[in-house]
Image: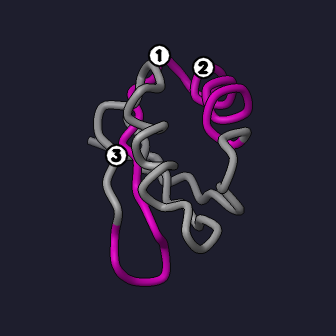
Amino acid sequence: MKAYILINIRVGSVGEVVRHLRRVENVVEANMTFGPYDAVAILQADDVNHLGRILADAIQPIPGIMETLTCLAVE
């Protein structure tokens, strides 16, 4: 399954957070964005439980991340 993770990041930490996201296993792509969110990460997971573990264990603990919004992709 594929998910788009929209991320709000503490001021001054965007570049560092995006670099960190790109090193997380199962993150296919991560980019800084303009608009209401500071970055977006595309995540590939086996199922919703796997997705939840990646978010809880590898993405949300990244220093500088303040909030995430997960959007599941559908075919």
The local crowd at label 2, few if under 14, some if 14 to 19, many if 20 or more residues have their Cα within 10 Å, is some
The quadrant of the rendering that contains the N terminus is top left
CA–CA distance in space, label 3 to label 2: 19 Å
The residue beneath circle 1 is: 46
Q: Amino acid at mark 3?
A: Ala
Where residue 9 appears, x then y in whole percent? 59, 65
Query: Real-space Cα distance between discs 1 and 3?
Result: 19 Å
Residue 39 location (% of width, % of height): 43, 61
Asked if the residues shown at circle 3 and circle 2 are in contact, with their CB atoms under 8 angstroms apart, the answer is no
Can I make out residue 31 in this image?
Answer: yes
Residues 59 and 16: in front is 16
Let me know if residue 1 appears in the view: no
Per the image, the residue denoted by label 2 is 50
Q: Residue 45 at x, y = what percent? A: 46, 22
The magenta stretch is 33-60
23 to the left or right of 8: left
Return the disc, 1 or 3, that comes first in the chain's sequence.
3
Counting from the top left corner in percent of width and height, residue 8 is at 59, 67
On the image, numbered disc 3 is attached to which residue? 30
Mark 2 and mark 1 residues within 8 Å of each other at the beta carbon = yes
Classify mark 2: helix, strand or loop: helix
Q: Any magenta on residue 37? A: yes
User: Which residue does the image show at 48% across and 61% down from the upper left?
Assistant: 14
